[in-house]
Image (cartoon, rainbow, N blue to C red):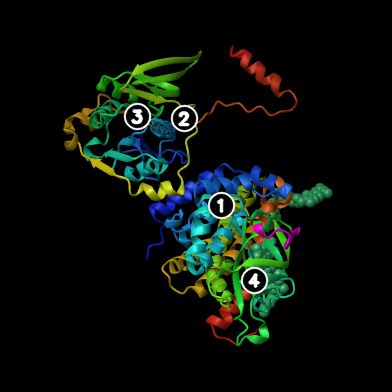
Amino acid sequence: MDFRLTEEQEAIREAVGEVCARFPDEYWRAVDARGDYPGEFVTALTESGWLAVLIPEEYGGAGLGLVEAGIVLEEINRSGGNGGACHAQMYTMGTVLRHGSDEQKRRYLPEIAEGRLRLQAFAVTEPTTGSDTTQLATRAERRGDGYVVNGQKVFISRAEHSDLMLLLARTTPLEQVESRSHGLSVFLVDLREADGAIEIRPLEVMMNHHTCELFMNDLELPADSLIGEEGLGLRYILDGMNAERILIASEAIGDGRWFVERGSRYASEREVFGRPIGANQGVQFPLAQAYAQVEAASLVRFQAATMFDAGEPCGPQANMAKLLASQASWNAANACMTAHGGYGFACEYDVERKFREAKLLEIAPVSNNLVLAYIGQRVLKMPRSY
Amino acid sequence: MKVAVCVKEVPDPAAPRKIDASTLRLDRSGEGALNPWDLPAVEAALRLVEEHGGEVVCVSVAPERAAATQRKALAMGADRAVLVADEAIAGSDLVATSRVLAEALRREGADLVLFGQQGADSDGAVLWAAVADRLRLPLMSQAAGLEVSGGTARVKRQTEHGYEVIEAPLPCVVAVSDAINEPRYPSLKGIMGAKKKPQETLSLADLGLDAGGVGEAGSGTAVYALGPPPPRGDSLVVEDDGQAAERILEFLVERKLA
Ligand SMILES: Cc1cc2nc3c(=O)[nH]c(=O)nc-3n(C[C@H](O)[C@H](O)[C@H](O)COP(=O)(O)OP(=O)(O)OC[C@H]3O[C@@H](n4cnc5c(N)ncnc54)[C@H](O)[C@@H]3O)c2cc1C
Ligand SMILES: Cc1cc2nc3c(=O)[nH]c(=O)nc-3n(C[C@H](O)[C@H](O)[C@H](O)COP(=O)(O)OP(=O)(O)OC[C@H]3O[C@@H](n4cnc5c(N)ncnc54)[C@H](O)[C@@H]3O)c2cc1C
């Protein structure tokens, strides 16, 4: 068992860190305050090739695995930034790579790798069905040699800042399928060609996340926008979800490291009652505890990523990594916030911004309760709740 | 054209320096880094070759582990690396080091040899002069600008009173200042490609050098003492009670510093 990163992986971490160092706290604070999309940051990352880690070499990417992709996202969040601005390209890559046709890959991947095309939106969640994905109501009906889509999505992030969007819709009505997980299909939608058929309404949330409501009204899609086979969409998405979980875990671990680092530094420097506040165990121990939890979560994350890259089934590990990492990060967030006393609330310390951002990872892209249900019911085979 | 860049591995510049009390040498056991002063030299070499064609070769005299550090220059875009590593070299002073480096450079026969301004560990800022002398090549230092055309290198040299513009015929040695450019960051492709680039490790014997000319034996200087800087016991803290500026001025005037 070798828990060390390779020289190349260390070099990746270091090089991403160098790009991130050009975007200091002030940059993210200003972007957050204005609700801007961190476009310059995403461009800098793309230009150096960091968003193309998962794209195969033949399409202009690096052809690396989730271990490396995780290192990239972790480093972004560890540096004080937010990978949320661009992570979807990595989240969705598995679905496109494994199930997309050669023609789709040839058409899109080289341009995505070069940064001329953004695949940053992923539309699953709906207002009436939420976590119960199989019940989603968006319909894609075959018409002629294409599809016509009607329906509504919510919390679809970066839809305004993306050229392409992966969409999950029902192609066969629930009543006509033998299992509720059948009859869903994945489409790669070119948002630039959707003129007028998709209405995008920004949805204000507690952090800078560019999330939107989407209303699709007779959206016409060509037949070749279907990914893989019709009706098997949920399987493709679930397949890609292990990757997504491992990557979200990596972002949470990056956040956790940031909180522990900032919290312990502040606790060592701030003096009241004639000594550094960090000398008090009430301040010190929660930070020490958080550090241990983040490190533990990181190991499970690397285990899951290594299994994924080796092509082994890794559902339990990927889910546990997401659960443990988001919890560790949230505990670290609380310890850091508390250690900062009143200053944690002051925007110029950046703790409140990261605090708002960190909470999301317990809920999206999948709520931790659903992860626990997966572990309880799929891994431990206890009775099912749904 | 062929540009050779001399690059050095230094202990992580962000970490405090430690001294090995038994050898009176800098403790180099921790994480190594590419000397930050060398990055502008690598960048300058890459830009010249992008403009004129040719190749960039990195040359180091260092223990074998420095091969990993050289890969950082390869990740930035250099074409290959040459490392002279030999147990006997340990303990060499600047003059002895210049003997080895000059020989490695002679073997390359580059049109232009670039150096950074100094090493972040020892801050010597003389190695390039010693190497130029051994190679009997013209030397231009403190280059804040560098152009090559028609077999001539033209340097904008930073001085205390302004810039000098000087020229020398190729081949020559140029030590660049960090004002010359903004070094690029290694890209993902650069990092991936670095492992596939040729890296050569040479011994003293490969260069036809004798162990007697290097290491402590080959050094004209010996280190008698090396220690951390003494704490600044005599520092004066001026609390700002509204009159701080006047008190600082008084202090400076008293010492004839203002
Ligand atoms: C900022 C932000 C960005 C997002 N970006 C995207 C995006 O880009 N694309 C996209 O498709 N979605 C996105 N989402 C949506 C996100 O994936 C969902 O919010 C999440 O999956 C939870 O669904 P829901 O909000 O409908 O909650 P619900 O499903 O209504 O759940 C509410 C609560 O009930 C719990 N719960 C529900 N069912 C069970 C059960 N059976 N057992 C135990 N507990 C249960 C949940 O754990 C949760 O705590 C985003 C959300 C946010 C907030
Ligand atoms: C929005 C907001 C509004 C406010 N409004 C007012 C106001 O109107 N008037 C006013 O006077 N103040 C106000 N405050 C200040 C607030 O009362 C202080 O922030 C609070 O008392 C904590 O002090 P501090 O921020 O200096 O934290 P510190 O005293 O630096 O404490 C930092 C951390 O160290 C811990 N700690 C410190 N000493 C010890 C110890 N000996 N043992 C164990 N743990 C210790 C603390 O519990 C805390 O977790 C406000 C603060 C905020 C954020």
Q: Disc 4: which chain?
A: A
Q: Are marks 3 and 2 on the same chain?
A: yes
Residue at 28% over, 38% down: B82
Q: How crowded is mark 2: few (under 14 residues within 10 Å), some or many (20 or more)?
A: few
Classify mark 2 as within 8 Å of ligand 2 or not, answering yes or no.
no
Residue range corresponding to the magenta coloring: A193-205
Q: In which quarter of the image is residue A289?
A: bottom right
Query: What amino acid does circle 4 point to?
Result: Tyr
Q: Name the residue under label 4.
A: A147
- On residue B176, the disc is none
Q: Are marks 4 and 3 on the same chain?
A: no
Q: Mark 3 and mark 2: span between their CA atoms? A: 13 Å
Q: Quadrant of residue B27?
A: top left
Q: Residues within 10 Å of mark 3 (few under 14, many from 20)?
A: few
**Mark 1 or 4, which is nearer the eye?**
4
- Is residue B5 inside the magenta stretch? no
Residue B133 lies, with reference to residue A57, above or below; the image says above
- On residue B225, the disc is 3
Q: Disc 3: which chain?
A: B
- In the picture as drawn, the residue positioned furthest to the front comes out as A144
Instruction: State the image coordinates of residue B119 (x, y, percent, origin top left).
Output: 39, 31
The kind of secondary structure element at disc 1 is helix
Residue A340 lies, with reference to residue A362, above or below; the image says above
- On residue B230, the disc is 2
Classify mark 1 as within 8 Å of ligand 1 or not, answering yes or no.
no
Residue at 44% over, 15% down: B165
The kind of secondary structure element at disc 3 is loop
Instruction: State the image coordinates of residue B186 (x, y, percent, origin top left).
Output: 45, 43
